[in-house]
Amino acid sequence: MGFFPSKIKLSLISAILMIHLPLSAFGAAITDIRFWSAPDHTRVVLDSTAPIQYQSSPQEDPAQYKIELTGITSFPKKKEIEVKDKYLLKISLIDLGKGKVQLVLYQKTSLQANIFALKPDLGKTHRLVIDLIDVGQEKKEQEEREKQKEIRQKGTKIVVIDPGHGGEDPGAVGPRKTFEKDVVLKVGEKVVHLINQQKEMKAFLTRKGDYFIPLEERVRIAREYGADLFISLHADGSFNPQVRGSSVYCLSLTGASDQAAKLLADKENMSNILGGAFLRPASLSKDPNLNQILLDLMQNNSMKESFRFAELVLNETKETHPLKFSTYRQANFMVLRAPDIPSVLVELAFITNKEDEHLLSQSVFQEKMAKNLVNAILKYFK
Ligand SMILES: [Zn+2]
């Protein structure tokens, strides 16, 4: 028997433990479960108050992927989520007792699983991400993109439109909860539709739905298509709700043109962290045929062409919407780094401004902005 009544002793012990043990030692509460459906994978995300300890068991039944989560203090009431996308039927949580919870992913087909944890960042909690990838489909999509390059007729120009953000990364959010990721996809689809009505032109999207693609992969997709022009579409955000207008950005290899451009590039580059980038081996491999001198030459030429296109976009856009800056700005945007493809990033308007948010969510405005871009593209290729 010790000196202290047991209650005091216990709180003393927990006070000591608090100092020495990380939060995860006390377990993690699962606060939310989400999923995102992409053409070649389904992503399942668990939000939690601390990192989740997990162990995945070898699949006895290929149609069920089971992961045992330990130290779970609580989890959402709804223990079953219907998915019914291309790859998953449902997700369920089974309470095994003593803080153990089994996560079961009911697959429609055999998939490759990639599990990784994301730390809290910019308002996001701890997350456990499970990507279930259809490796065959991933490869097929890549081959189909590369085929476009081969079958294109001489003189046909290829434009790749990149709707920013997606999935876990909503981008900037408006006062009426309009998401940047949604409006840029809408505008992107309109641009692609309009371009594909033109003769000797073809357009493709990097992202066709609400899922995330790492920034490097967006560049790789453009190169696989053999793009002659790459446009990344965004909507700006600011703490100041008065700020509004459109702006256009190009890459800078030597530092940003101004502090605001640098901050914007930092923010856009955060997308990988927010969206949960998991680099596939293909994203890491460099093309062995490209040497540095050649790369520099190509980059120089691509950048000059990007500036020319950026001016054309500004000229067209100002007919529809006030410009935030009358000239293009430059900073180190990861998504503009294809050395051989002229690339620009367009901030359509400020989603954090009430009027701009209203416009961005209107299909009339989306259509006008899309037309402006297409006009600029036509002039660029002339
Ligand atoms: Zn953005």
Image: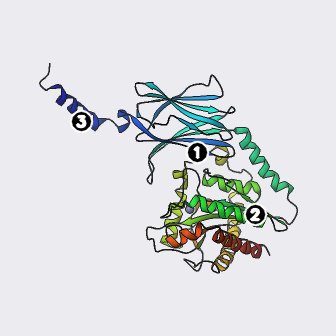
Q: How many numbered circles does the render carry?
A: 3
Q: Which mark is residue 258?
A: none
Confirm or reject: label 1 Cβ below 8 Å from ligand 1.
no
Q: Earlier in the sequence, mark 2 or mark 3?
A: 3
Name the residue carrying label 3. 15
Q: Secondary structure at mark 1?
A: loop
Name the residue carrying label 1. 278
Crowd tier of the residue under label 1, counting other residues whose Cα lies within 10 Å: few below 14, some 14–19, many 20 or above:
some
Residue kind at label 1, given as amino acid type: Phe
Name the residue carrying label 2. 193
Residue kind at label 2, given as amino acid type: His
Question: Taking 317 as reference, is 68 left or right?
Answer: left
Q: Secondary structure at mark 3?
A: helix
Of residues 83 and 160, the one nearer the viewer is 83
Q: Give the residue furthest to the top.
A: 1
Instruction: Give coordinates of residue 33: x percent, y percent.
Output: 51, 41
Q: Give the residue furthest to the right.
A: 153
Q: Earlier in the sequence, mark 3 or mark 1?
A: 3
Instruction: Give coordinates of residue 170: x percent, y percent.
Output: 54, 56
